[in-house]
Image: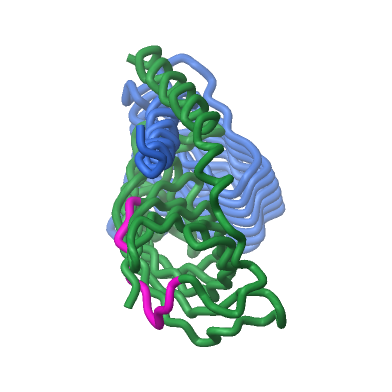
């Protein structure tokens, strides 16, 4: 083989090696499956989805931005991050603590807890219960009946459907609809 | 499938090593020009179409990818920086396109948010995420100082510190540091094979000098 061709083939083989190695590199667990705890921590950003749509258990912590997007019957938790985001369907349980901001959209019968947070903003469907504890600003948009418990939180703003005023309940909750 | 790909990678590596072991006589015939006052290729500008590969891209993208691009360089200091050494300096700029797959990450991958909506209290809520790490289209515009060292009549090496401006679809423009080292192998009077490794990409192509 002529010397020049030999070197050309050498360079080409190195490049092919790099391509083949790259194609063979598969890593990571993929999107979360229902019933399994999917944890994400460290680094800067992590946003998890639910491969099965419903029933995922998503946890993220100790990073800058994180969040989860899930269907019905999901559990979402995040802590020790700057910005935490949660978006889920009906019958979800979500917790957000020790963060700068917690933002959430959830459907009916949602349980959402904010604790030790600077800003907590939740838009929740009917039948939801929201708790803000040691939160600088807690803003809740209720899309139906809901109850909001604020403790050591100022202001605690609750908006109800059709501009109705929330009512104070004996339990200490602010409620849209009946207590 | 995965085993077959890895097998191909190992085979290609073995072929490369065998060829490398038989390429010695070529280098033995080369005469050093590193202390010469004459640059082996007399040129003022260079244009280099190439293939690009990359991993762990800057910004919010993830994974590894491949694409095509072109680099141009204009010589600004033919005598270089070092007296007595055959070096030269050029300003290089380029345009590279790379399609990245998050799943092809060397350290695992994470899904990314595709869409944020404003929430109450000034929050932002992610409402859509990628699946299996997603895919990302990058356009890189590297701007570098290319410091060349003319080693022999056929071989030259270079270092390229600079910046790589980039556009990531859905996330806009940004910039990252860029650093490359590379080499050229002369095929004809003003044509070389050119390869570079570094960040954010590696490339392999041909240079045409004018």
In the image, residue B176 above or below residue A148: below
Q: Which shade of the palette goes to chain A?
A: blue
Bounds of the magenta segment: B41-51
Place residue B205 in its image quadrant.
Answer: bottom left
Q: Is residue B155 visible?
A: yes
Residue A53 on the magenta span? no
Q: Is residue B158 left or right of residue B171?
A: right
Q: Residue at x 37, y 79 (%)?
A: B45
In the image, residue A170 above or below residue B7: below
Q: Nearer the viewer, residue A76 or B146?
A: B146
In the rendered image, residue B130, in percent from the top left (x then y), is placed at 35, 40
Q: Nearer the viewer, residue B5 or B79?
A: B79
Q: Residue at x 41, y 66 (%)?
A: B166
Q: Is residue B102 left or right of residue B49?
A: right
- Quadrant assignment for the N terminus of chain A: top left
Colour theme: by chain
Residue B44 on the magenta span? yes
In the rendered image, residue B107, in percent from the top left (x then y), is placed at 56, 33
In the image, residue B5 above or below residue A59: above
């Amino acid at each position: 083989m002529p010397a020049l061709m030999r070197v050309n083939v050498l360079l080409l083989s190195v490049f092919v090696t790099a391509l083949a190695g790259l194609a063979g590199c598969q890593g990571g667990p993929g999107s979360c499956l229902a019933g399994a705890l999917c944890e994400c921590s460290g680094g800067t950003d992590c946003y998890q989805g639910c491969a099965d749509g419903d029933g995922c258990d998503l946890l993220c912590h100790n990073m800058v931005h994180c969040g989860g997007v899930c269907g019905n019957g999901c559990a979402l938790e995040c802590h020790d991050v700057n910005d935490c985001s949660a978006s889920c369907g009906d019958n979800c349980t979500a917790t957000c603590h020790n963060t700068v901001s917690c933002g959430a959209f959830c459907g009916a019968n949602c349980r959402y807890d904010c604790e030790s947070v600077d800003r907590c903003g939740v838009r929740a469907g009917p039948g939801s219960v929201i708790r803000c504890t040691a939160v600088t600003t807690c803003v809740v948009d209720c899309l139906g009946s809901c109850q909001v418990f604020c403790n050591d939180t100022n202001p605690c703003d609750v908006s109800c459907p059709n501009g109705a005023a929330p009512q104070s309940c004996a339990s200490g909750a602010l409620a849209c609809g009946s207590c | 499938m995965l085993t077959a790909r890895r097998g191909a990678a190992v085979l290609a590596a073995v072929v490369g090593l065998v060829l490398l072991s038989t390429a010695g006589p070529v280098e033995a015939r080369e005469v050093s020009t590193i202390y010469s006052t004459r640059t082996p290729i007399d040129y003022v500008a260079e244009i280099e179409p190439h293939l690009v590969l990359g991993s762990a891209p800057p910004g919010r993208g993830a994974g590894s990818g491949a694409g095509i691009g072109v680099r141009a360089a204009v010589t600004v200091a033919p005598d270089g920086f070092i007296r007595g050494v055959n070096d030269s300096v050029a300003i290089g700029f380029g345009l590279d396109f790379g399609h990245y797959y998050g799943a092809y990450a060397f350290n695992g991958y994470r899904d990314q948010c595709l869409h944020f909506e404003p929430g109450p209290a000034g929050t932002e809520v992610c409402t859509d995420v990628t699946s299996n790490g997603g895919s990302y289209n990058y356009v890189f515009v590297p701007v570098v100082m290319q410091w060349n060292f003319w080693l022999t009549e056929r071989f030259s090496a270079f270092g390229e510190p600079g910046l790589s401006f980039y556009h990531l679809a859905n996330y806009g423009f940004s910039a990252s540091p860029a650093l490359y080292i590379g080499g050229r192998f002369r095929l004809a009077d003003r044509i070389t094979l050119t390869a570079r490794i570094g960040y954010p990409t590696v490339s392999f192509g041909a240079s045409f000098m004018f």
